[in-house]
Amino acid sequence: MELESPIESNFRLNDFQKAGLKKLGLKTIRDLLFYLPSRYGDAAEVKHITELKAGELTVISGRVIKNEIKKAHIKKIPIAEVTLEDDTGRIKAIWFHQAYMAKKVPEGGLAKITGMVTDRKGTLYIANGEIEAVEEIELAHKSSLFAKGELTRTPVYGESLGASSSWFHHTIKKLIKAGVHEKLTDPIPNEILKKYHLPALRSALVWIHCPQNDNDALSARKRFAFEEIFFIQLSRQKEKLKYKANPTFQIVVDPKQVNEFLGRFSFKPTGAQINSIDQILKDLSSNKPMTRLLEGDVGSGKTAVAATVAHMTISNRPMNIEGSARQDFGALQVAYMAPTEILAKQHFESFIQYFKHLGINVGLITGSGCFKFPSKSSPGQFTNISRAQLLKWVANGEIPILIGTHALIQKSVKFKHLALVIIDEQHRFGVEQRFKIARKTTETVPHLLSMTATPIPRTLALTIYGDLDLTIIDQMPEGRRQIITEIVLPANRKLIYEQVRKSINEGRQAYIICPRIDEPDPEKEQAVNAKSVKEEAKRLKKDIFPEFEIGIVHGKLVPKAKEKVMKDFTDGKINILIATSVIEVGVNVPNATTILIEGAERFGLAQLHQLRGRVIRSNHQAYCYVFTDSKTEKTLDRLRALKTAKNGFELAELDLQQRGIGELNGKKQWGVSDIGMEAIKNIKMVEAARTEVVNILERDPELLNHPLILNKLTLRHKPTHFE
Ligand code: ADP
Ligand code: MG
């Protein structure tokens, strides 16, 4: 079996299995070998049949003396029955609705069954277990596969259509038995493995797919987690080094000018804002291009920081790259990119406020039009201009500040002296885009400032933003009205509805967030006791708020319908907007001051924090009502952190520690697999990976002496199991 050969030329697959593998993106034997189990089933103890007791999870093995398919008396559902015999006795295993289970092993053959021992009227049987055929030789080497009293755990793989967990389990076991993994070379240097007590690649593959005990499985998982984090960091750091090797514009910082600019603000900047400005200006004044990420909660004042450093940048005259004569015309330029038109427009308007006293031009470019401030005819205003005109002024340097959406990174947009690129809500843009906009000038590259309000734990930031230096604004402006957050128990529901009614009658608006769009389909899903957007809208309109306009919005609405609802809400035609947790980033309705979150125990804390951020957009008192049906002290405690935590980042850390990786909001977009996320919990491991990456790249930036690492890095860019 060749590592790169297609799965289908090695195994007979039915159409269902083919479709499942395709969906999971698994093509080759290598892909299969690296398709890691997401967890392990409960530990089952290997026993003799006569020792079995009801209620225990067990593994038994023996000969199949009978297999048949029957119909149950009630409802006539098909039942598969297999009778297994070992040296001590016999037992039946039964499957409901899964008649094919009986056909998995022929009568007379050997089998292993893992499952729950159940008592029916005094007779023991095994219900809905896992059955697999065992070869004679395996039984002869009984000790290696299963010895009495041993604990075995079955790996559980992510499934899709016909590619079931047990198919993966058996197929991958065959690969390991055939020794396919022996052909692999380990991309992680031996010294590093030794230093952190990590198993080598080959052992790790055996241990993770066919663990003999919990420790092996654990240490294998640790290795793959490390490996993933190591390679993400390596690729990011490499990008960073490459970027930093370019010449850039060295900004001369004049503290007096900075202070003057800050002095004009209508508020006193926070200490955290001042620190951030200092750090960024220090980067700008060096001769290496900056790659920095500014993290701060919604409302922490990132725009003011951006404006200040933009101001210092455009106050500089372009210098020749060699640093010789200063040109005495034009200024350096700043590009400011936002993910949505609404946000871009908002930034344009605040930048006009920050810069209007200087008489400089500020441009706005979006898909639906171009604008310039100031207007020639009425200098206090901005004006609509043609795209061609705007592009001309950007290209000749007459517009020093250009704000926009994705439209900014189009080829046709050319700058004269682009020195600073600011990217707002940077997680909405890929790493590729981050550098694409930055490469708009040929020989010199601009400084890069990314900004985000998405609270993620520090370890995750260090990894996925490994190409960026980190600055955190951990302080909110003083005198802000604090949002009032209440954890609401079911008994107080009516009371809260009255509060909402009162606030709407005073002219405000409200959001209600539900965990799901539709009611569950009882045929397909277990009844989940969570409110749905559609049902809740009907119920509230009928029973609670008949006098108000209620609108709904969720991911399954077509864009046109979504826009209409959002516009009606913005215009105040809708009083209450019922939505799933994915209300658009661009939503900014200052008049909405209450948010009510249903089934809050289903959300991560950081996510809840971001949701409530939507209603702190005005001078009105904002309220967040967190509804939960959960009565467990642990869940309530967790939710109470919303009242005590200082900021979103603290909540993200709490999420990570308390609920674990699966709960981190939007983890898919980060391109980190579940196993990689396990490492994110472990600051030591993340730091270790970082240290090793920096060590290697310092000595060997092009990885010329590390061909295995380089090879793996290139492989990573192909779609694989973790993407
Ligand atoms: P974000 O970090 O979410 O981008 P913004 O920059 O939009 O936050 O700032 C939110 C609001 O807070 C703006 O109206 C801004 O003028 C105001 N603001 C910023 N810094 C301060 C401060 N230090 N004190 C008071 N208000 C501030
Ligand atoms: Mg902002």
Image (cartoon, rainbow, N blue to C red):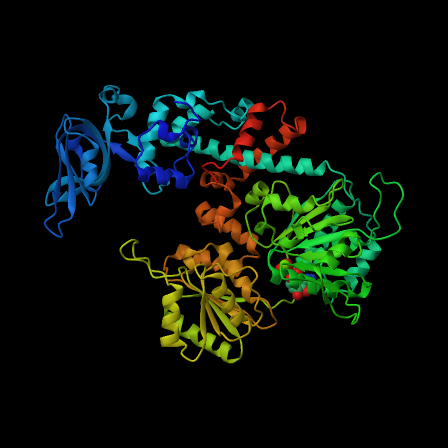
Rendered position, 326 above or below 186:
below
Q: Which residue is drawn at 37% across and 57% down?
A: 632
Q: Can residue 212 be seen in this view?
A: no
Rendering coords of residue 234 (x, y %)? 59, 34
- Image vertical order of residue 101 relative to residue 561, above or below: above
- Vertical placement of 487 versus 204: above or below? below
Q: Image height check: is 137 above or below 45? A: above
- The image shows a total of numbered marks equal to 0
Q: Position of residue 237 (x, y in %)?
A: 63, 36
The quarter of the picture where residue 353 lies is: bottom right
State the quadrant of the N terminus: top left
Which quarter of the figure has residue 438?
Answer: top right
Q: Is residue 76 left or right of residue 27?
A: left
Q: Which of 70 and 394 is in front in this view?
A: 394
**Quadrant for ligand 2?**
bottom right
Q: Is residue 495 visible?
A: yes
Residue at x 28%, y 29% (from the top left corner): 150
667 relative position to 82: left or right: right
Residue 436: percent from left, percent from top: 65, 44
The spot of residue 626 in percent (x, y) is 45, 64
Q: Nearer the viewer, residue 23 or 240?
A: 23
In front of the other: 35 or 400 = 400
